[in-house]
Image (spheres, rainbow, N blue to C red):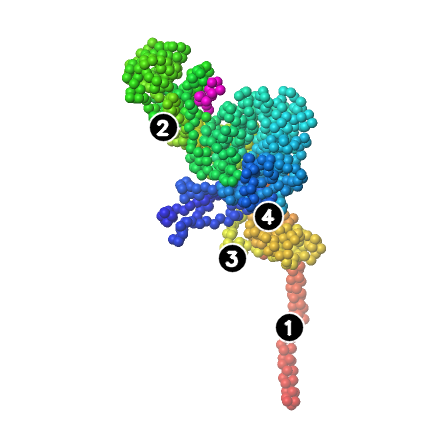
Amino acid sequence: FLGVFTSGGLAPSLGIINSTYTGIFHFNLTLFSDRIYWLINIPRENITKNTDIAAVEEWLVRITLQHGLNIYTTQGTLLDNVREPILQWDLGTLMTKNDITKVYPYVVDLKVAKCPCANDVALLGFILNKTYNGIYIGLSFSGFWDYNDTVWYNLTDTIYSQVGEEHTELSVVDMVLTNHFLVILTSLGLFVSGDLRYPSSSVLFSRADFCGFERVDYVKGKLWYNEKCFANREHFEVDYVTITFERNRTLSESSSCFYTKEPFREWFPCLPHILKGMKSFPSTVVTFLVDQEHSAGIYLFSNQKSTIASVSILKNNKPGLNPKFPLFVFPSSFSSPVGMVFHPRSHFLYAYGNQVWLSIDGGNTFELLADFHDDIIKNTYHSFYTSDITFVSQSGNVYLTKAGLRRYSKIGSISDNIFTLYYDHMGFIHKLTPDHFEPDVSLTTLGNSRGIFGEPPDMGFETALAPQYISLKEIIFYAYVPANEPQGNIYTKKFSNMHLGKVIHSRKTGTAYIRKVLQHNTSEGFLSSIIAEVINPFGIEEVNESSCLSSSLSINQAGNASYKLTLQSQNLDIEKTVVIPGYSSFLITRVLDAKNALAMATMPERALSNMSFQKDSWFLYNLGHKNGRMWSIYAKPCNYWFQHDHSLSLNVLKYIDLGKSHTLKVKVIPNTKGVQTLEIPLLKVIVGNANLLEVKAEGSFDDTDSYVMKISAASKGSTSLALVIWGASTECFVTTVVPTLKNSCSYLKSMHHIPSELIPLEDWISGVHKDSQGFNMIKTLPINYRPPSNMGIAIPLTDNFYHADPSKPIPRNLFPKSKRSGKFKQCANMSTREECNCTNDQKFSHAVAFSDCREKVPRFKFPVTQYPVSLGIYSENGHTPVETPYLVTMTEVNRRENWKLQHSVPENVKKLKNYLESHLNAPVYNPLGLNLSIKGSELFHFRVSVVPGVTFCNLVEEFQIYVDEAPLPFPGHTLIAVATAVVLGGLIFTAFMFQIRNIHPSDICQKFMTRNKVNLSNFSINQMPHR
């Protein structure tokens, strides 16, 4: 198969994606005959160059057999374990499998804390009973897929070093893993780790003191955290953590709720001082959360009389005295509040307990999502990637919704006594128990994971339904509540919000899509109903199933909504419904005798008394439950697909620069076979903080009934924007997309100098790149080179070395000023160049910070005139030239002169230029058409900076030019010219004197040569006798 695929010119592609980055890498097209797979090798620096320890977002990896075709797609994750903070530490003493096995019998509950930016990195803590002692935590970097991959640590000694070993009954109570800190609530106190970005041999914890609180309080304490990923962190982004105690404060205590911000050293009472004595305020703070999008603190108060939500503005990171909004008072039915939580990386706020409430406006208002009556939601679990939210009740029932969606489903139940749930980075849900992990592998691109909760449950309830047709495609089902039903059980025989968007099935035949749930203010009978769209026609009763169909039908009123039907009835017809086209339907509730029965009218105003109908003019439907329920309700298969333009990430982070806007384009594709597509907008746009975001949305249907929306947004801060397919089924993989728009500088945005001639990398490596005239345009700098100063070539005064090598001598180091200057940076305290650890990127970098590593620079002939200084801004959106209003300043980092710039200033820019120059005390230039001329020699190192006030980014670029083959500098050239003139003048004067004296130098030389020859001959003759 692979050979056939490759022979067609196709090869797999690999996409690496997070909220700010998308990179596509292609496998080699060639598939060798001895291979049954493709290989690809991607150097780490092709994805990221950073190696510092910091909160960094985990990447998604998506492999397709051909990029763009989306066929045979598989996905995974990629974790940067070099930078992930918690992975750089030894949390405590390592435990073997036998060690941790001994702890299992004493575990009574589990707590999970996951990294906000990399959900595959998570901690699992054991909550122990009073008969055992210790802090035992498991660390996974692979999302708890394999129990054997979990590394277990014993932190008992670390905690006891803070509280003393005389205390007993030590156990984990709760945990929070923030972007940079680990917070552990134990039975003996609250402990905060040091900054995880700066690892040491072991984690050091500090204990937070809460005066008056003891072990009995700590074991009932809870930690609350608004999960946000602070990768590429801004200065205003900071984590907050809250602790609440389940008791009323005493006169000697400042509060029963405390909060703190990073680094979690000082804890403050949640309530302002003026509120403490107010009797009108509830005494118990159930939850306090910090909403960073609105700079507000949100309270959930509760007492025996009421449950209230309140929002206070944060001033200097402290809640103000006055509420931001009027108090929101929940109805008395919300009697058992448990907590409040933000869905990660979004502004969706959920309050939960025996009911679940949703707020999309920062706690100003809440909308009822679900009512569980006597069953209380104890825990919520969230996936930022799939927008899944799972609620688990105290009875073990499991419910699912999507962030921002106003419907939910029951997806099963859990019978384990000790368990917790956990979503990994890709949205797979895992059931964790002390001795094993059970991941769900049923997640597909069209549905949700739920295999660990058993088969999809029937969401129907035990009562009879009465169908009432409105048209051939629209039907109403009324749920019957008997008059003698106990008051406490009535809610079990009514439709609820859980049934919205589901599909009702008849055991005979027929399905319908539930579009609306209605509640009726009647004392008995039909207390609720649903409006549904018929997908498949519902089957009717036949004569052999009900003999009454062979008779005529007479109707007479017997009460307000009760009617007596005359027909050949029998007990088997109880809970069957008589349907008469154009009139009210009648649910048979009791058989009086062989020819009479009592029935309830679904629409009494359309029920006519004293009417008769011949056989075959009316129908009988069986949707009762007396002999086994004849109907059921299940979740509807996914009915919409979400298409994101220009991005493979579901939760993108977009940076919007000063004065700019961003455009999003999305498409909702209906997959509603057999169901009518309504001509109303399919997408709802919800702004996290409307004060910070200006949104313009335009939506329309295309020719394929797909809904296309174009959104233009201009941000004034950092806030989220939610796009919710309001009619989507909870079975859909994507119903909600939450892009974050941040009015800030993108870490991918930078300014670059565009050289006049591009030199290939291989030529930079070789050091040779010749122009058309054979001039080498690459200069290899001497070792420990320093550029000249204004005092001369031999007197460098700069602190910057180039091509540094501490083992070699430093040239041009004779003068005292030169000896006092020059400092190594990368090579400081090193003995050889190899120890400087210069990377290839540093060797080719123009930045002065890496001048020690720089070996080769661009080379030009003297003089350099009208060199175009071309600048471009590069970002995730592409490349744009630098032009007004991006005015720039330009300096030479080594304080060299002999250069100047030429530029043109438009009339509309002159005023801005003059204003900036007066405030910056530096020349300001128009980057468009900027030209550089150099009359000096050797290396010039320039820095170009965009002026402040026109962008959030600190746009700075550096470039270098080496000027070679320059004439000798003053005074060398002048001295040579003068000396040459003197010599030539002397020669001319001597020749003149010889001429007027009639002296002929040639004759003198000839006579001299002749006399030497005669002397030499005589000498030879005289020596002959001696031989």
Q: Earlier in the sequence, mark 1 or mark 3?
A: 3
Residue type beneath disc 4: Ala
Callout 3 crowding tier (Cα within 10 Å): few <14, some 14–19, many ≥20? few
Q: Earlier in the sequence, mark 4 or mark 1?
A: 4
**Magenta span dominant secondary structure:** helix
> x%, y% of residue 764?
53, 54
- Nearer to us: label 4 or label 1: 4
Q: Nearer the viewer, residue 142 or 35?
A: 142
- Nearer to us: label 3 or label 4: 4
Q: CA distance from mark 1 to mark 3?
A: 48 Å
Tell me the residue at 63%/79% (across/down). Answer: 1010
Q: Which mark is residue 774?
A: 3
- Nearer to us: label 4 or label 2: 2
Which quadrant is home to the C terminus?
bottom right
The quarter of the picture where residue 241 lies is top right
Q: CA distance from mark 1 to mark 2?
A: 122 Å
> x%, y% of residue 414?
48, 33
Q: Residue furthest bottom?
A: 1025
Q: Which mark is residue 1001?
A: 1
Magenta-tinted stretch: 486-497
Q: Earlier in the sequence, mark 4 or mark 2?
A: 2
Residue type beneath disc 2: Gly
Tell me the residue at 68%/54% (across/down). Answer: 818
Residue type beneath disc 3: Gly
Q: Which residue is mark 2?
A: 674
Q: Are marks 4 and 1 in contact (CB under 8 Å)?
A: no
Q: Secondary structure at mark 4?
A: loop
Q: Which mark is residue 847?
A: 4
- Nearer to us: label 3 or label 2: 2
Q: Are marks 1 and 3 in contact (CB under 8 Å)?
A: no
Tell me the residue at 56%/51% (across/down). Answer: 839
